[in-house]
């Protein structure tokens, strides 16, 4: 069977294309897929071993079976459902988030507090392997799966913080300059002491773990994809 694999961030850069085709004999698994990719695309060998694979937008293990017509994606470790009990606002946006629009989506008659975390592009970097000065960030996402995982984060927030009512998650994509907003997580509750602060912190931490979005740090003479250390497992699926 012929399979199409979507590639993101460093994996896409290694082969210079966003999708590759692989022939596999059935029965096939993620493990046999990775071996076939390394054989056909030796330039991907290092990245494939540590990559995350999703099959039909669910995180897969090496033993996960693969069938013809599956939607398969492969990406570095990242730096739901449609029925929600409370208001939500999820977006992958090229423009800066509109706080008035987000608040209007979350605020209901029983809401008295909205806690918002907002990230921004930092110009100075002090991490090993990163450019010392950043002039731009480039964000890329696996958009279909990213929105689904935002929904999963909202469900997890409600399980841990039952007094939180509304949840908004926004991730910017494309090229962003120093000072531009990158992410936003907002949590609404009746009062400020009903878990909204803690829920917003949980939301941004979880976004960086399971939402398939990657960033490239760009300086005057260097660009580097930033890969995370958290590797999702099937336990991260809902």
Image (cartoon, helix red, strand yellow):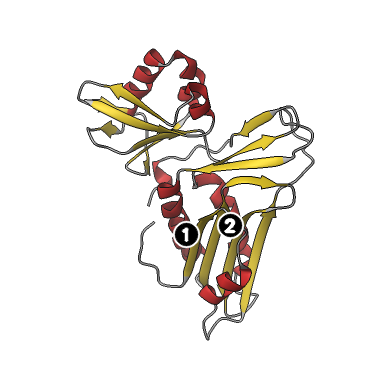
Query: Can you tell which mark lies on residue 202?
Result: 2
**Along the line of sight, the residue nearer the viewer: 114 or 191:** 114
Report which residue position mark 1 lands on.
156
**SS category of the residue bearing label 2:** helix
First along the sequence among labels 2 and 1 = 1
Q: Does 226 appear above or below 211?
A: above
Quarter of image, res 191: bottom right
Characterize the local packing of mark 1: few (<14), some (14-19) or many (20 or more) Cα atoms within 10 angstroms. some
Residue 37 at what x, y percent from top left? 38, 20
Quarter of image, res 20: top left
In the displayed structure image, the side of residue 68 where residue 102 appears, left or right: right
Q: Does 101 appear above or below 65?
A: below
In the displayed structure image, the side of residue 219 where residue 196 appears, left or right: left
Q: CA distance from mark 2 to mark 1?
A: 9 Å
Q: Are marks 2 and 1 in contact (CB under 8 Å)?
A: yes
Residue 17 at what x, y percent from top left? 45, 27
Quarter of the image with the N terminus is top left
Q: Does 149 appear above or below 50?
A: below
Query: Can you tell which mark lies on residue 190?
Result: none
**Along the line of sight, the residue nearer the viewer: 143 or 117:** 143
In this orientation, does residue 161 appear? no
**Residue at 39% of width from left, 42% of height from top?**
234
**Residue at 43% of width from left, 47% of height from top?**
236
Quarter of image, res 39: top left
Q: Does 172 appear above or below 227?
A: below
**SS category of the residue bearing label 1:** helix
């Amino acid at each position: 069977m012929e399979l199409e694999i979507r590639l993101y961030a460093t994996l896409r850069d290694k082969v210079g294309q966003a999708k590759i085709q692989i022939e596999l004999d059935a029965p096939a698994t993620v493990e046999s897929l990775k071996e076939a990719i390394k054989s056909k695309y030796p330039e991907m060998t290092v990245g494939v071993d540590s990559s995350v694979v999703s099959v039909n937008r669910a995180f897969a293990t090496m033993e996960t079976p693969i069938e013809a017509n599956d939607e398969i994606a492969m990406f570095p470790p990242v730096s739901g459902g449609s029925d929600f009990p409370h208001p939500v606002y999820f977006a992958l946006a090229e423009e800066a988030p509109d706080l008035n629009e987000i608040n209007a989506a979350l605020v209901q008659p029983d809401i008295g507090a909205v806690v918002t975390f907002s990230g921004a592009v930092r110009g100075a970097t002090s991490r090993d392997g990163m450019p010392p000065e950043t002039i731009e960030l480039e964000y890329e996402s696996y958009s279909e799966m990213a929105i689904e995982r935002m929904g999963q984060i909202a469900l997890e927030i409600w399980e841990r913080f039952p007094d939180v009512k509304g949840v908004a998650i926004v991730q910017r994509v494309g090229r962003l300059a120093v000072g531009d907003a990158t992410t936003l997580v907002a949590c609404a509750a009746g009062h400020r002491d009903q878990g909204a602060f803690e829920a917003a912190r949980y939301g941004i931490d979880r976004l960086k773990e399971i939402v398939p979005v990657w960033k490239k740090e760009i300086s005057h003479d260097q660009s580097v994809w930033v890969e995370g250390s958290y590797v999702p497992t099937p336990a991260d699926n809902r």
